[in-house]
Image (cartoon, rainbow, N blue to C red):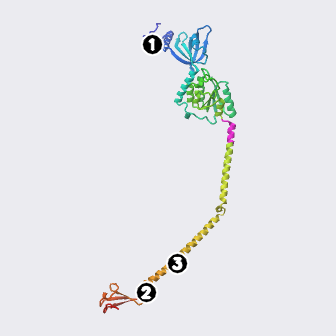
Protein backbone atom coordinates (compact mmCIF):
# COMPACT_ATOMS: atom_id res chain seq x y z
CA UNK A 1 0.00 0.00 0.00
CA UNK A 2 1.33 3.41 -0.94
CA UNK A 3 2.28 5.89 1.76
CA UNK A 4 -0.38 8.63 2.13
CA UNK A 5 0.75 12.17 1.46
CA UNK A 6 -0.61 15.40 2.95
CA UNK A 7 -2.32 15.99 -0.36
CA UNK A 8 -3.99 12.60 -0.31
CA UNK A 9 -7.54 12.14 0.91
CA UNK A 10 -8.34 11.28 4.47
CA UNK A 11 -8.34 7.69 5.60
CA UNK A 12 -11.44 5.66 4.82
CA UNK A 13 -12.66 2.12 4.90
CA UNK A 14 -11.32 1.61 1.41
CA UNK A 15 -8.04 3.47 2.10
CA UNK A 16 -7.04 2.96 5.74
CA UNK A 17 -3.74 4.24 7.11
CA UNK A 18 -1.10 1.83 8.36
CA UNK A 19 -0.14 1.88 12.03
CA UNK A 20 3.22 3.40 11.23
CA UNK A 21 1.53 6.31 9.48
CA UNK A 22 -0.83 6.93 12.38
CA UNK A 23 2.11 6.81 14.79
CA UNK A 24 4.02 9.21 12.58
CA UNK A 25 1.11 11.63 12.46
CA UNK A 26 0.66 11.44 16.25
CA UNK A 27 4.36 12.13 16.76
CA UNK A 28 4.18 15.13 14.43
CA UNK A 29 1.20 16.62 16.29
CA UNK A 30 2.82 16.08 19.70
CA UNK A 31 6.08 17.53 18.47
CA UNK A 32 4.33 20.80 17.62
CA UNK A 33 3.92 21.55 21.37
CA UNK A 34 7.64 22.25 21.61
CA UNK A 35 9.59 22.84 24.80
CA UNK A 36 7.48 23.60 27.87
CA UNK A 37 7.98 24.14 31.61
CA UNK A 38 6.06 21.54 33.64
CA UNK A 39 5.26 21.61 37.37
CA UNK A 40 4.68 18.33 39.18
CA UNK A 41 5.64 15.95 41.96
CA UNK A 42 8.15 13.13 41.67
CA UNK A 43 6.31 9.84 42.20
CA UNK A 44 9.17 7.52 41.23
CA UNK A 45 12.86 7.73 40.32
CA UNK A 46 14.60 4.93 38.44
CA UNK A 47 18.38 5.10 38.26
CA UNK A 48 19.95 2.13 36.48
CA UNK A 49 23.56 1.43 37.40
CA UNK A 50 25.90 2.40 34.64
CA UNK A 51 23.15 4.00 32.57
CA UNK A 52 23.24 7.70 31.71
CA UNK A 53 19.48 8.01 31.42
CA UNK A 54 17.27 8.47 34.49
CA UNK A 55 13.56 7.70 34.35
CA UNK A 56 11.16 9.82 36.41
CA UNK A 57 7.44 9.52 36.99
CA UNK A 58 6.01 13.04 37.24
CA UNK A 59 2.58 13.20 38.87
CA UNK A 60 0.00 15.96 39.13
CA UNK A 61 -0.54 16.60 42.88
CA UNK A 62 -4.21 17.43 42.35
CA UNK A 63 -5.25 14.69 39.94
CA UNK A 64 -4.60 11.02 39.29
CA UNK A 65 -2.43 11.75 36.26
CA UNK A 66 1.23 11.07 35.60
CA UNK A 67 3.80 11.24 32.81
CA UNK A 68 7.11 9.52 32.26
CA UNK A 69 10.13 11.80 32.08
CA UNK A 70 13.58 10.88 30.81
CA UNK A 71 16.62 12.97 31.47
CA UNK A 72 20.36 12.68 31.61
CA UNK A 73 22.02 11.73 34.88
CA UNK A 74 24.27 14.77 34.58
CA UNK A 75 21.20 17.06 34.51
CA UNK A 76 20.02 15.71 37.86
CA UNK A 77 23.48 15.73 39.41
CA UNK A 78 23.97 19.33 38.35
CA UNK A 79 20.54 20.85 39.19
CA UNK A 80 18.88 18.48 41.69
CA UNK A 81 21.44 16.15 43.26
CA UNK A 82 19.27 15.35 46.30
CA UNK A 83 16.06 14.75 44.38
CA UNK A 84 13.84 12.17 46.09
CA UNK A 85 10.37 10.77 45.63
CA UNK A 86 7.65 13.19 46.74
CA UNK A 87 9.62 16.31 45.85
CA UNK A 88 8.05 19.13 43.86
CA UNK A 89 9.96 19.98 40.69
CA UNK A 90 9.77 22.19 37.64
CA UNK A 91 11.23 20.66 34.49
CA UNK A 92 11.98 22.00 31.05
CA UNK A 93 11.00 19.24 28.66
CA UNK A 94 9.71 18.42 25.21
CA UNK A 95 7.01 15.79 24.67
CA UNK A 96 8.01 12.82 22.57
CA UNK A 97 5.96 9.97 21.15
CA UNK A 98 7.70 6.60 20.69
CA UNK A 99 5.99 4.76 17.81
CA UNK A 100 7.57 1.42 18.63
CA UNK A 101 5.85 1.25 22.02
CA UNK A 102 3.05 3.71 21.38
CA UNK A 103 3.97 5.66 24.53
CA UNK A 104 4.26 9.32 25.36
CA UNK A 105 7.00 10.75 27.55
CA UNK A 106 8.80 13.98 28.28
CA UNK A 107 12.47 14.48 27.46
CA UNK A 108 13.89 16.95 29.99
CA UNK A 109 17.03 19.00 29.69
CA UNK A 110 16.55 20.90 32.96
CA UNK A 111 15.15 19.73 36.30
CA UNK A 112 14.84 22.15 39.19
CA UNK A 113 13.61 21.19 42.62
CA UNK A 114 11.14 23.65 44.10
CA UNK A 115 12.39 24.94 47.45
CA UNK A 116 10.33 25.29 50.59
CA UNK A 117 10.34 29.07 50.32
CA UNK A 118 8.89 28.97 46.82
CA UNK A 119 6.25 26.44 47.90
CA UNK A 120 5.22 28.67 50.80
CA UNK A 121 5.07 31.65 48.44
CA UNK A 122 2.76 29.68 46.13
CA UNK A 123 0.57 28.72 49.08
CA UNK A 124 0.37 32.35 50.18
CA UNK A 125 -0.62 33.41 46.66
CA UNK A 126 -3.27 30.67 46.58
CA UNK A 127 -4.48 31.79 50.03
CA UNK A 128 -5.13 35.32 48.71
CA UNK A 129 -6.91 33.93 45.65
CA UNK A 130 -9.23 31.66 47.65
CA UNK A 131 -9.98 34.41 50.17
CA UNK A 132 -10.89 36.79 47.34
CA UNK A 133 -13.24 34.17 45.90
CA UNK A 134 -15.03 33.84 49.28
CA UNK A 135 -13.92 30.31 50.19
CA UNK A 136 -12.87 31.55 53.65
CA UNK A 137 -16.08 33.50 54.30
CA UNK A 138 -17.25 32.77 57.89
CA UNK A 139 -20.89 33.37 56.94
CA UNK A 140 -20.99 30.26 54.74
CA UNK A 141 -19.58 27.93 57.39
CA UNK A 142 -22.06 25.43 58.85
CA UNK A 143 -22.28 24.15 62.41
CA UNK A 144 -21.91 20.38 62.82
CA UNK A 145 -25.09 18.66 64.08
CA UNK A 146 -25.46 18.37 67.83
CA UNK A 147 -25.84 14.58 67.77
CA UNK A 148 -24.56 13.01 64.51
CA UNK A 149 -25.81 9.54 63.69
CA UNK A 150 -22.77 8.65 61.61
CA UNK A 151 -19.41 10.39 61.38
CA UNK A 152 -17.24 10.06 58.30
CA UNK A 153 -13.50 9.98 58.96
CA UNK A 154 -10.81 10.45 56.31
CA UNK A 155 -7.35 9.60 57.61
CA UNK A 156 -4.31 7.43 57.08
CA UNK A 157 -4.49 3.69 57.53
CA UNK A 158 -3.58 2.57 61.04
CA UNK A 159 -2.70 6.13 62.01
CA UNK A 160 -2.75 7.57 65.50
CA UNK A 161 -5.32 10.08 64.26
CA UNK A 162 -7.74 7.26 63.41
CA UNK A 163 -7.23 5.62 66.80
CA UNK A 164 -7.72 8.92 68.63
CA UNK A 165 -10.94 9.78 66.80
CA UNK A 166 -12.37 6.29 67.28
CA UNK A 167 -11.41 6.03 70.96
CA UNK A 168 -12.68 9.48 71.91
CA UNK A 169 -15.91 9.06 69.93
CA UNK A 170 -16.75 5.68 71.48
CA UNK A 171 -15.92 6.92 74.97
CA UNK A 172 -18.03 10.06 74.64
CA UNK A 173 -21.05 8.56 72.84
CA UNK A 174 -20.97 4.75 72.44
CA UNK A 175 -23.91 4.73 70.02
CA UNK A 176 -22.17 6.89 67.40
CA UNK A 177 -21.23 5.19 64.13
CA UNK A 178 -17.95 5.84 62.34
CA UNK A 179 -17.36 5.33 58.64
CA UNK A 180 -13.59 5.43 58.21
CA UNK A 181 -11.99 5.81 54.78
CA UNK A 182 -8.23 5.24 54.78
CA UNK A 183 -6.22 7.20 52.25
CA UNK A 184 -2.61 8.34 51.88
CA UNK A 185 -2.18 11.62 53.73
CA UNK A 186 1.11 12.60 52.10
CA UNK A 187 2.90 11.94 48.88
CA UNK A 188 1.87 12.29 45.22
CA UNK A 189 -1.29 10.17 45.48
CA UNK A 190 -2.69 11.86 48.61
CA UNK A 191 -4.76 14.66 47.06
CA UNK A 192 -6.73 12.62 44.46
CA UNK A 193 -7.57 9.88 46.94
CA UNK A 194 -8.58 12.36 49.66
CA UNK A 195 -10.85 14.14 47.18
CA UNK A 196 -12.40 10.83 46.11
CA UNK A 197 -12.96 9.78 49.74
CA UNK A 198 -14.55 13.19 50.45
CA UNK A 199 -16.92 12.83 47.52
CA UNK A 200 -17.86 9.29 48.56
CA UNK A 201 -18.70 10.34 52.14
CA UNK A 202 -20.47 13.49 50.99
CA UNK A 203 -22.75 11.42 48.73
CA UNK A 204 -23.71 9.16 51.67
CA UNK A 205 -26.94 10.56 53.14
CA UNK A 206 -26.28 8.70 56.40
CA UNK A 207 -23.08 10.68 57.11
CA UNK A 208 -23.88 13.84 59.06
CA UNK A 209 -20.36 15.27 59.41
CA UNK A 210 -16.92 14.49 57.96
CA UNK A 211 -13.62 14.67 59.86
CA UNK A 212 -10.44 15.11 57.82
CA UNK A 213 -7.63 14.14 60.19
CA UNK A 214 -3.87 13.79 60.03
CA UNK A 215 -1.18 13.78 62.69
CA UNK A 216 1.77 16.12 62.86
CA UNK A 217 4.45 16.38 60.24
CA UNK A 218 6.79 18.71 58.41
CA UNK A 219 5.65 21.49 56.14
CA UNK A 220 6.38 19.30 53.11
CA UNK A 221 4.29 16.47 54.58
CA UNK A 222 1.29 18.78 54.99
CA UNK A 223 1.47 20.26 51.48
CA UNK A 224 -1.39 18.09 50.12
CA UNK A 225 -3.77 19.84 52.52
CA UNK A 226 -2.98 23.21 50.93
CA UNK A 227 -3.80 21.93 47.45
CA UNK A 228 -6.27 24.08 45.50
CA UNK A 229 -8.31 21.11 44.22
CA UNK A 230 -8.77 19.75 47.76
CA UNK A 231 -9.78 23.18 49.08
CA UNK A 232 -12.40 23.56 46.38
CA UNK A 233 -13.69 20.02 47.00
CA UNK A 234 -14.15 20.80 50.71
CA UNK A 235 -15.89 24.07 49.83
CA UNK A 236 -18.29 22.26 47.47
CA UNK A 237 -19.19 19.52 49.96
CA UNK A 238 -22.82 19.46 51.18
CA UNK A 239 -21.84 17.81 54.47
CA UNK A 240 -20.08 19.89 57.16
CA UNK A 241 -16.35 19.22 57.16
CA UNK A 242 -14.13 19.39 60.27
CA UNK A 243 -10.37 19.44 59.78
CA UNK A 244 -7.70 18.33 62.24
CA UNK A 245 -4.43 18.61 60.34
CA UNK A 246 -1.06 18.58 62.08
CA UNK A 247 -0.52 20.53 65.27
CA UNK A 248 -2.07 23.72 66.61
CA UNK A 249 0.60 25.86 64.93
CA UNK A 250 0.05 24.29 61.50
CA UNK A 251 -2.34 26.16 59.21
CA UNK A 252 -2.87 24.43 55.87
CA UNK A 253 -5.33 26.15 53.54
CA UNK A 254 -7.97 23.45 53.95
CA UNK A 255 -8.37 24.59 57.59
CA UNK A 256 -9.61 27.98 56.40
CA UNK A 257 -12.10 26.45 53.96
CA UNK A 258 -13.50 23.83 56.36
CA UNK A 259 -16.61 24.55 58.38
CA UNK A 260 -14.71 23.93 61.64
CA UNK A 261 -11.02 23.68 62.46
CA UNK A 262 -9.87 21.50 65.35
CA UNK A 263 -6.44 21.63 66.94
CA UNK A 264 -5.94 17.84 66.95
CA UNK A 265 -7.86 14.70 65.92
CA UNK A 266 -8.83 14.25 69.57
CA UNK A 267 -10.17 17.80 69.66
CA UNK A 268 -12.09 17.13 66.42
CA UNK A 269 -13.81 14.11 67.98
CA UNK A 270 -14.70 16.18 71.06
CA UNK A 271 -16.17 18.96 68.92
CA UNK A 272 -18.22 16.59 66.76
CA UNK A 273 -19.38 13.90 69.20
CA UNK A 274 -21.10 15.08 72.41
CA UNK A 275 -20.07 13.58 75.75
CA UNK A 276 -22.88 11.32 77.04
CA UNK A 277 -21.80 11.75 80.66
CA UNK A 278 -21.51 15.51 80.30
CA UNK A 279 -24.84 15.81 78.51
CA UNK A 280 -26.48 13.63 81.17
CA UNK A 281 -24.99 15.87 83.85
CA UNK A 282 -26.24 18.95 82.03
CA UNK A 283 -29.73 17.44 81.77
CA UNK A 284 -29.74 16.60 85.50
CA UNK A 285 -28.42 20.05 86.36
CA UNK A 286 -30.99 21.65 84.09
CA UNK A 287 -33.81 19.69 85.66
CA UNK A 288 -32.62 20.68 89.12
CA UNK A 289 -32.46 24.33 88.10
CA UNK A 290 -35.94 24.14 86.61
CA UNK A 291 -37.24 22.42 89.74
CA UNK A 292 -35.69 25.10 91.98
CA UNK A 293 -36.99 27.85 89.74
CA UNK A 294 -40.54 26.42 89.78
CA UNK A 295 -40.42 25.84 93.55
CA UNK A 296 -39.17 29.39 94.11
CA UNK A 297 -41.89 30.77 91.90
CA UNK A 298 -44.58 28.78 93.74
CA UNK A 299 -43.19 29.94 97.11
CA UNK A 300 -43.19 33.58 96.03
CA UNK A 301 -46.74 33.35 94.74
CA UNK A 302 -47.84 31.56 97.94
CA UNK A 303 -46.31 34.33 100.05
CA UNK A 304 -48.06 36.88 97.90
CA UNK A 305 -51.39 35.12 98.32
CA UNK A 306 -50.84 34.89 102.07
CA UNK A 307 -50.09 38.61 102.17
CA UNK A 308 -53.25 39.34 100.21
CA UNK A 309 -55.31 37.14 102.51
CA UNK A 310 -53.91 38.82 105.61
CA UNK A 311 -55.11 42.23 104.52
CA UNK A 312 -58.28 43.42 106.34
CA UNK A 313 -60.21 43.81 103.14
CA UNK A 314 -59.79 40.08 102.43
CA UNK A 315 -59.60 38.78 106.00
CA UNK A 316 -62.89 40.61 106.93
CA UNK A 317 -64.58 41.72 103.69
CA UNK A 318 -67.61 43.05 105.66
CA UNK A 319 -65.39 45.77 107.15
CA UNK A 320 -65.19 47.46 103.78
CA UNK A 321 -68.96 47.22 103.32
CA UNK A 322 -69.63 48.48 106.89
CA UNK A 323 -67.27 51.43 106.45
CA UNK A 324 -68.90 52.34 103.20
CA UNK A 325 -72.38 51.89 104.76
CA UNK A 326 -71.53 54.26 107.61
CA UNK A 327 -70.11 56.75 105.18
CA UNK A 328 -73.21 56.48 103.01
CA UNK A 329 -75.48 57.01 106.03
CA UNK A 330 -73.50 60.09 107.11
CA UNK A 331 -73.67 61.56 103.63
CA UNK A 332 -77.40 60.80 103.46
CA UNK A 333 -78.06 62.50 106.84
CA UNK A 334 -75.97 65.43 105.79
CA UNK A 335 -77.88 65.70 102.54
CA UNK A 336 -81.21 65.51 104.40
CA UNK A 337 -80.18 68.26 106.84
CA UNK A 338 -78.81 70.41 104.07
CA UNK A 339 -81.97 69.96 101.99
CA UNK A 340 -84.24 70.64 104.99
CA UNK A 341 -82.33 73.78 105.85
CA UNK A 342 -82.57 75.03 102.30
CA UNK A 343 -86.33 74.26 102.19
CA UNK A 344 -86.92 76.10 105.47
CA UNK A 345 -84.97 79.11 104.26
CA UNK A 346 -86.89 79.10 100.98
CA UNK A 347 -90.24 78.89 102.87
CA UNK A 348 -89.30 81.84 105.08
CA UNK A 349 -88.27 83.85 102.06
CA UNK A 350 -91.51 82.95 100.33
CA UNK A 351 -93.57 84.11 103.35
CA UNK A 352 -91.70 87.40 103.51
CA UNK A 353 -92.16 87.93 99.79
CA UNK A 354 -95.85 87.10 100.08
CA UNK A 355 -96.24 89.61 102.93
CA UNK A 356 -94.47 92.31 100.93
CA UNK A 357 -96.57 91.49 97.94
CA UNK A 358 -99.75 91.74 99.95
CA UNK A 359 -98.62 95.03 101.44
CA UNK A 360 -97.95 96.46 98.01
CA UNK A 361 -101.06 94.99 96.38
CA UNK A 362 -103.90 97.47 95.38
CA UNK A 363 -106.37 95.06 96.93
CA UNK A 364 -104.93 95.78 100.37
CA UNK A 365 -105.31 99.51 99.76
CA UNK A 366 -108.90 99.08 98.59
CA UNK A 367 -109.56 96.98 101.70
CA UNK A 368 -108.89 100.12 103.70
CA UNK A 369 -111.74 101.95 101.91
CA UNK A 370 -110.13 103.12 98.71
CA UNK A 371 -111.53 102.52 95.22
CA UNK A 372 -110.22 102.53 91.67
CA UNK A 373 -112.16 104.63 89.14
CA UNK A 374 -111.85 103.60 85.53
CA UNK A 375 -113.28 105.03 82.38
CA UNK A 376 -115.15 102.94 79.89
CA UNK A 377 -111.96 102.23 77.95
CA UNK A 378 -110.33 100.86 81.07
CA UNK A 379 -108.02 103.74 81.85
CA UNK A 380 -107.73 104.69 85.50
CA UNK A 381 -108.98 108.20 86.25
CA UNK A 382 -106.44 110.15 88.21
CA UNK A 383 -107.68 113.73 87.60
CA UNK A 384 -111.16 115.18 87.43
CA UNK A 385 -110.22 116.92 84.25
CA UNK A 386 -109.95 113.53 82.59
CA UNK A 387 -113.79 113.07 82.60
CA UNK A 388 -116.75 115.19 81.72
CA UNK A 389 -120.33 115.19 82.77
CA UNK A 390 -122.22 112.29 81.39
CA UNK A 391 -119.18 109.89 81.19
CA UNK A 392 -119.73 106.37 82.43
CA UNK A 393 -117.32 105.21 85.09
CA UNK A 394 -116.47 101.90 86.71
CA UNK A 395 -115.65 102.06 90.38
CA UNK A 396 -113.75 99.02 91.68
CA UNK A 397 -114.13 98.44 95.41
CA UNK A 398 -112.45 95.98 97.73
CA UNK A 399 -115.45 93.78 97.21
CA UNK A 400 -117.25 94.15 93.89
CA UNK A 401 -117.52 97.25 91.71
CA UNK A 402 -119.97 100.05 90.82
CA UNK A 403 -121.07 101.68 87.61
CA UNK A 404 -121.77 105.44 87.78
CA UNK A 405 -122.36 108.42 85.57
CA UNK A 406 -120.57 111.73 86.05
CA UNK A 407 -122.96 114.49 86.89
CA UNK A 408 -120.45 117.21 87.39
CA UNK A 409 -116.66 117.63 87.95
CA UNK A 410 -114.80 119.87 90.31
CA UNK A 411 -111.20 120.78 89.84
CA UNK A 412 -108.75 120.18 92.65
CA UNK A 413 -108.29 123.03 95.12
CA UNK A 414 -105.21 123.89 97.03
CA UNK A 415 -105.32 123.04 100.76
Nearer mark to the viewer, of 2 and 1: 2
Part of the protein shown in magenta: 274-284
Image: 119 above or below 386: above
Give the x, y percent position of residue 123. Answer: 56, 24
The residue tagged 3 is 344
The disc, 1 or 3, on the residue closer to the chain's N-terminal end is 1
Give the x, y percent position of residue 264. Answer: 65, 29
Question: Are discs 2 and 1 less than 8 Å apart at CB?
Answer: no
Q: Which residue in the rendered view is the most extreme toward the left?
A: 389
Q: Quadrant of residue 316?
A: bottom right
Q: CA distance from mark 2 to mark 3?
A: 27 Å
Callout 3: few (<14), some (14-19), or many (20+) C-alpha neighbours within 10 Å?
A: few
Tell me the SS state at disc 3.
helix
Tell me the SS state at disc 2.
helix
Image: 304 above or below 369: above
Nearer mark to the viewer, of 1 and 3: 3
Question: Are discs 1 and 3 less than 8 Å apart at CB?
Answer: no
Amino acid sequence: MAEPTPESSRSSLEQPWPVRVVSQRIGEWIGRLGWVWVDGQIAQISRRPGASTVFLTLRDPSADLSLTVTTNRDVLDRNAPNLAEGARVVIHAKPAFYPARGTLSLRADDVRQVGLGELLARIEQLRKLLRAEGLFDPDRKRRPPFLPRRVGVITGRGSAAERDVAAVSQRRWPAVQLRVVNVPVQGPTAVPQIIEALRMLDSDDGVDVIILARGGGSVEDLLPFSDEALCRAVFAARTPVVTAIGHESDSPLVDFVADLRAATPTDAAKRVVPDLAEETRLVVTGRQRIRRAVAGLVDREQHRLDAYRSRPVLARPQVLVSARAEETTAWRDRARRCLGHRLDAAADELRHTHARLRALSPAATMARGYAVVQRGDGRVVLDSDEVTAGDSLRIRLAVGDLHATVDATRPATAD
